[in-house]
Image (cartoon, coloured by chain):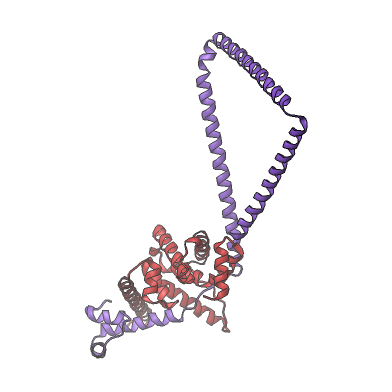
Chain colours: A purple, B red
Amino acid sequence: MASNHPHIEVWLFSKDSLIPQESALLQAHLKTCETCQNLFAALQVVEKQLHASPMLAPEAGFSRRWEARLASQRLMRQRWQTNLALACSAAILLAFLGALAWLSLPVLQSPFAYLLILVYRLTSFYYTLADLSSGLGFVVRLVLALAPPTLWITLAVVAASLIALWTVTYRKLSSMWRLNL
Amino acid sequence: MQSSEISWLKQAQNGDTEAFARLVELYQKPVFNLCYRMLGDPAEAEDAAQETFLRAFRSLRRYDDNRPFGTWLLSIAAHYCIDKLRKQRMSTVSTDEVESYQLTDKRPGPESSLAQREEQQMVQALLLELNPIERAAVVMYYWYDYSYAEIGEALSLTESAVKSRLHRARRAMALKVLEQRDQEIALERARHGEQSPAY
């Protein structure tokens, strides 16, 4: 049953300490008002029960269960990411195949003309390649004639040494950077 | 915070699961207790406590070192339980459905265990009278001795809002005790009425 004395209720239920005058007024009121007296007694029961109630612990092995749950969540996330990657790849592949089918539709309708164009393109590509290789052969023969073979061997050995030095330096520097992290 | 705790925290922030498991071991009791007091069911409390630690582990990089780790954990637990209660609307669960937690009984005799269980049920019944935020504030105030400022920080409330919530909570719980007492008196009277001979 709620009381009809809201200002008294404020004093009763707020845990702020009252000034002596307010405290005296509260005590005097409690002596005369049965409703507020009951509320005060009920509050005391509540506070006693709450203060007496112990801190409850979970069943043994809580942290082990937590670790197992973390592992299972990580596994689930990995599976989800794999499935997502597979789904994306499948979608891209489907789109590619769809585009290919769309583009090859005219070829399927009149294949002879496209076959002729293809043969022409392949032949011209072959001749271009042959021209390029003969030009490149001429340049190589010219350069070889200008310098003796020992110079080429020396240059190759110097280049290989430089590459090896660069690789070793890079590996050492990158491992030091990792250690600093 | 102790130095070992700080070191575990630093290791955990670098992704060390074992270091965080030590922190779980250390804080499992307060987190579980808050979840149980909020949800009133041991299985749900276990689930909520586990989820709290998972969320904490995931957002450990965002943790502010100046804040007590325990308060931060309890804040995550309280917000998780508040959301769960809001979703389930568990505050309408009747007191008969409150499951009492089996305490490790240190006192001899079956009566003590029964009394403890009854006390637990009464406390949970009182807490169920409150809305989720009031419940969290009451648990933090009475079980963890948190100040209004700490409760406010954990529940994202101002100090005056915390005071007002606690005031309302105490009033609701006191009224519940009075209601229970009136029901007991009425039952007692009815029993005596049945037993008394008819003149």
How many numbered markers are drawn?
Answer: 0
Q: Nearer the viewer, residue A155 or B6?
A: A155
B191 and B122: which is toward the camera:
B122
State the image coordinates of residue A136 (x, y, percent, origin top left): 66, 22
Up the image or down, A140 lies above or below B96; here it is above
In-image side of A11 versus B116 (left or right): left
Residue A171 pos. (x, y %): 66, 50
Apparent side of residue B198 relative to residue A110 in the rendered image (left or right): left
Location of the C terminus of chain B (image quadrant): bottom left
Which residue is outermost to the right?
A: A150
Looking at the picture, tell me which residue is in the foreground, B61 or A167.
A167
Residue located 41% across and 58% down the image: B88
Q: Give the answer, above or below, for where A13 lies relative to A131.
A: below
Q: Nearer the viewer, residue B175 or A135?
A: A135
Look at the image and tell me whether residue B110 can be seen. yes
The vertical placement of B2 against A137, above or below, is below
Give the residue drawn at x 66%, y 53%. Answer: A172
